[in-house]
Amino acid sequence: MPGSFDIYVKKYLQRGHSGMTNWFNDDIIDPTNGDYNKELTERNPGRSVWDHRAGEFNGLRIGADFVPVRNTKLLLHYTYGKLGLFDPGLGTLTGKKDDYSFFRAQWEVYF
């Protein structure tokens, strides 16, 4: 309905590395697959992007959805927290954590 909106806060407590990680983490992806490989490497000298493989995420998302006109929706959210790092060779978490945050704006049109 035009003019309607929703404001929300989402708490992530995704633990461990499982086949369901992507279901719960929405668009929180492993940095090795993202657009920020270069930035991660520059911020963490001496470490490879493979050192940032995430096995868990603990953080918050603050967001809002707004319907400006019929059949459209504007979604805005900011997500921040800590990624628990995973060593695929060992099959366990390493105990190290990386800071992780991003802002997302998305415009949806429904037909």
Image (tube, rainbow, N blue to C red):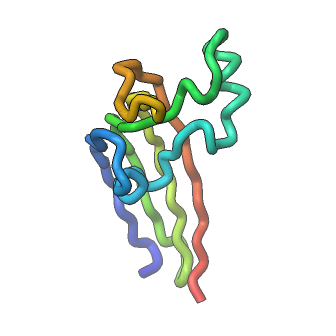
Q: Using residue 50 as the reference point, say whether residue 53 is left or right of it.
A: left
On screen, residue 109 versus residue 87, left or right, reads right
Q: In the displayed structure, would residue 76 be above or below residue 16?
A: below
Residue beneath the point at 42% across and 54% down: 22
Residue at 65% across, 10% down: 46
Q: Residue furthest front?
A: 89
Comparing 60 with 105, the one in front is 60
The picture quadrant where one finds residue 7 is: bottom left
Residue 92 or 22: which is nearer the viewer?
Answer: 92
Which quadrant is the N terminus positioned in?
Answer: bottom left
Q: Position of residue 89 (x, y in %)?
A: 47, 31
Q: Residue furthest top?
A: 46
Relative side of 77 to 9, left or right: right
Q: In the image, residue 9 lies at what x, y percent?
A: 31, 48
Q: Quadrant of the C terminus?
A: bottom right
- Please, is residue 36 above or below residue 21 in the view? above
Residue 85 position by quadrant? top left
Q: Position of residue 95 (x, y in %)?
A: 34, 20
For image coordinates 66% across by 10% down, the residue present is 45
Q: Position of residue 84 (x, y in %)?
A: 38, 29
The residue closer to the viewer here, 80 or 28, is: 28
